[in-house]
Amino acid sequence: MDTYATDIFEQLKGASKLLYLINPYETIFEFPHQVPDYHKQIWLPFFVLIFLEQIILVSKKKRKIRLNDQVTSLSHWLFQETGRILFRGAEYYAYIVINERYGWWSLPWNSLWTWCVTAVGVDFCYYWVHRSNHEVHFLWAQHQVHHSSEEFNLAVGLRQSVLQHWCNFVFYLPLALFIPPSHFIAHNQFNLIYQLWIHTTVIDDLGPIELIFNTPKHHRVHHGCNLYCLDKNYGGVLIIWDRLFGTFMEEKKEDEIIYGLVVSPRTFNPVYLQVFYTVQMITKSIGMSNLTDKLAVVWKGPSWFPGSPRLGLDEYKINVTSRIKYDNYIPSWQNFYIIVHFYLVFYQHVQLYDEPPQDLKTLPSGLILINNLFALTTFGLLFDKSSYAGLVEFVRCIVYLSTSTIHNSLNWCMYYIYGSSCCVWILYFLCTIKSNFANIRDS
Ligand SMILES: [Zn+2]
Ligand SMILES: [Zn+2]
């Protein structure tokens, strides 16, 4: 019990990493494999912050808790984390190879200066990574996942494309010529971790800090789809890059910021949200009359059309000034059901972090992975009030229950919950059939 309490205390101490308050002497390593997975150290404090943010918003009567949007954001996070578990940092491979072959001017790994130069260098590259994610259509097709929520809260910080790291790693490769991989891997994580807390409406103005650092106030502008917000404030930790390269925009108090994509996809299905934009981009490309334009659709800006500048013309962009948010009423028992099953998915996901890579290929781990992704998709269907959501969820529960029973991989508690869930759906189908018969009889 004492060890458990110490573990939790240690994890809560990790909260300082959310603000880039890090002791360099504790985070300098010689070899890449020695660098810890810092993301794992901040999840607990960050989830505490998500919970506190919702309490503050509800107590100020600013918002009601939107379970559908929160669960969708967390589902994207679980999708991306599953990718991270499976890829095992393979995207760093090219960086390490370039450093080994061409890093003749590599800075010393055990120097405080190297730590500081890397912090700034990684943030400088992040600015260009992020700007490219908005200005190059095929990169935007992935990055739009992060912008797909009509809300702006801490959970949105976790909403990412599964392929986001793979789209970004190329932009950091010039650093491999002079920055040791161990420093790069550590700061790449710190840089992304810092960007989690800036997704909130709870924090207003931070005074002189706003001049140098990226803050919630600046990042709110970045997530707005009002015309004045589009393609602004790309910075990660520092906002000075936007001020230097002409992409900075101050928040306008008189214009309420409308969050989300200019054309909102109106669904909570995480799989659809991950892929729909890529399909739209391919369709647009196929619709062009010649090969040059077909390719230009892919590498020019998302608003580009033949005859316009690379990023399209502002006069043809939609100025979103108001929006009715996509929201559906679903019965309380379904909300409760989703909370219980989301917790199960989360619990099983956490077990996978500790699995050795070879064990991830085993059937029980594979079953957990597939079931988790299947479950998150069905939650989206339930929030969307899809007519086949209940049937899909019933099939998921019964398949997982039977396959896990064969492999003896469920504890009694999960066995009980999955068994009860199957009964709930059978009852639901019987009630639906009964009410349909009653409707036919009445008419
Ligand atoms: Zn962005
Ligand atoms: Zn963001």
Image (cartoon, grey):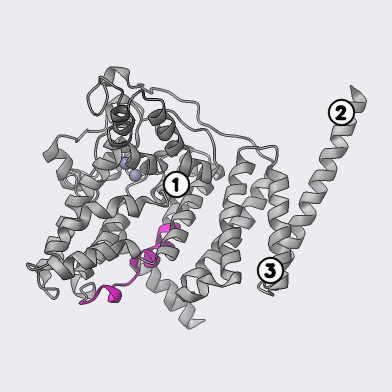
Mark 3 residue crowding within 10 angstroms, few (<14) / some (14–19) / many (20+): some
Task: Label 3, secondary structure: give it.
Answer: helix
Q: Which residue is mark 2?
A: 439
Q: Position of residue 339 (x, y in %)?
A: 61, 53
Q: Which residue is mark 1?
A: 56
Mark 2 residue crowding within 10 angstroms, few (<14) / some (14–19) / many (20+): few
Q: On the picture, is 382 further left or further right than 326?
A: right
- 3D distance between C-alphas at marks 3 and 2: 39 Å
* Span highlighted in magenta in the image: 30-48
Q: Position of residue 232 (x, y in %)?
A: 25, 35
Seen from the viewer's position, the closer of residues 285 and 344 is 285
Residue 404 numbered mark, or none: 3
Seen from the viewer's position, the closer of residues 310 and 394 is 310
Name the amino acid, label 3: Ser
Residue 124: tell me if it is visible.
yes
Q: Position of residue 25 (x, y in %)?
A: 19, 74
Q: Do the residues under discs 1 and 3 have CB atoms within 8 angstroms? A: no
Task: Label 1, secondary structure: give it.
Answer: helix
Q: Is residue 82 above or below residue 250?
A: below
Residue found 60% across the figure and 70% down from its top:
363
Mark 1 vs 3, N-terminal side: 1
Name the amino acid, label 2: Asn
Residue found 9% across the figure and 69% down from its top:
107
Seen from the viewer's position, the closer of residues 223 and 101 is 101
Mark 2 vs 1, N-terminal side: 1
